Image (cartoon, rainbow, N blue to C red):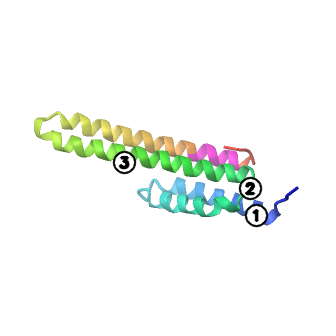
């Protein structure tokens, strides 16, 4: 039977808390702190155990999904700007802006719900 020391468990909780805070502060920083947050999660995931490991894994997943959607939205926005020559690009750019806002809102809500779960010592 293996046991984890309290220091490892506390380190996982502290890392998960740090990542959630960085994620929530990433909106005013244009996403730069989210990148720092996912790096912290990737580095500390291997030292975390139990619920804290699940939080760090969830944080990495949330960031990856948001990042992939941002790439798609960026490509659609570029296509929209090219198509503004024939006027169809304006609604495409507008819809891409709405989609970007939805991704930002989803990222924020998932981070807040994860932080609440972390404070209650339960899985995300």
Asked whether disc 3 touches disc 1, contact meaning CB atoms under 8 Å apart, the reply is no
> What is the spatial separation of the Cα atoms under label 3 and label 2, in whole angstroms?
32 Å
Asked whether disc 1 touches disc 2, contact meaning CB atoms under 8 Å apart, the reply is yes
Say what secondary structure mark 3 lies in.
helix
In this view, the residue farthest toward the front is 1
Q: Callout 2 environment at 10 Å: few (<14), some (14 to 19), or many (20+)?
A: many
Residue 62 percent coordinates (x, y): 53, 47
The residue under the point 60% across, 64% down is 43
- The answer to which of marks 3 and 2 sits earlier in the sequence is 2
Residue 27 percent coordinates (x, y): 46, 53
The residue under the point 49% across, 49% down is 64
In the rendered view, tell whether residue 87 sits above or below residue 59: above
In this view, the residue farthest toward the bottom is 7
Q: Which residue is mark 3?
A: 71
Q: Which residue is mark 1?
A: 8
In this view, the residue farthest toward the right is 1
| Residue 82 occupies quadrant | top left
In which quadrant of the rendered image does the N terminus lie?
A: bottom right
In which quadrant of the rendered image does the C terminus lie?
A: top right
- The stretch in magenta equals 111-118
Q: Which residue is mark 2?
A: 49
The residue under the point 82% across, 63% down is 6
Q: Callout 1 environment at 10 Å: few (<14), some (14 to 19), or many (20+)?
A: some
The residue under the point 20% across, 37% down is 90
Say what secondary structure mark 2 lies in.
loop
Say what secondary structure mark 1 lies in.
helix
């Amino acid at each position: 039977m293996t046991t984890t020391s309290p220091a490892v468990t506390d380190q996982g909780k502290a890392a998960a808390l740090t990542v959630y805070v960085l994620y929530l502060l990433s909106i005013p920083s244009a996403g730069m702190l989210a990148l720092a947050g996912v790096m912290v999660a990737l580095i500390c995931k291997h030292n975390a155990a139990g619920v804290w490991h699940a939080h760090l894994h969830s944080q990495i997943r949330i960031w990856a999904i948001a990042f992939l959607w941002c790439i798609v939205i960026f490509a659609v926005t570029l296509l929209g700007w090219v198509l503004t020559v024939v006027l169809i690009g304006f609604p495409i750019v507008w819809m891409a802006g709405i989609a970007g806002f939805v991704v930002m809102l989803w990222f924020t809500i998932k981070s807040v719900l994860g932080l609440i779960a972390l404070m209650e010592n339960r899985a995300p």
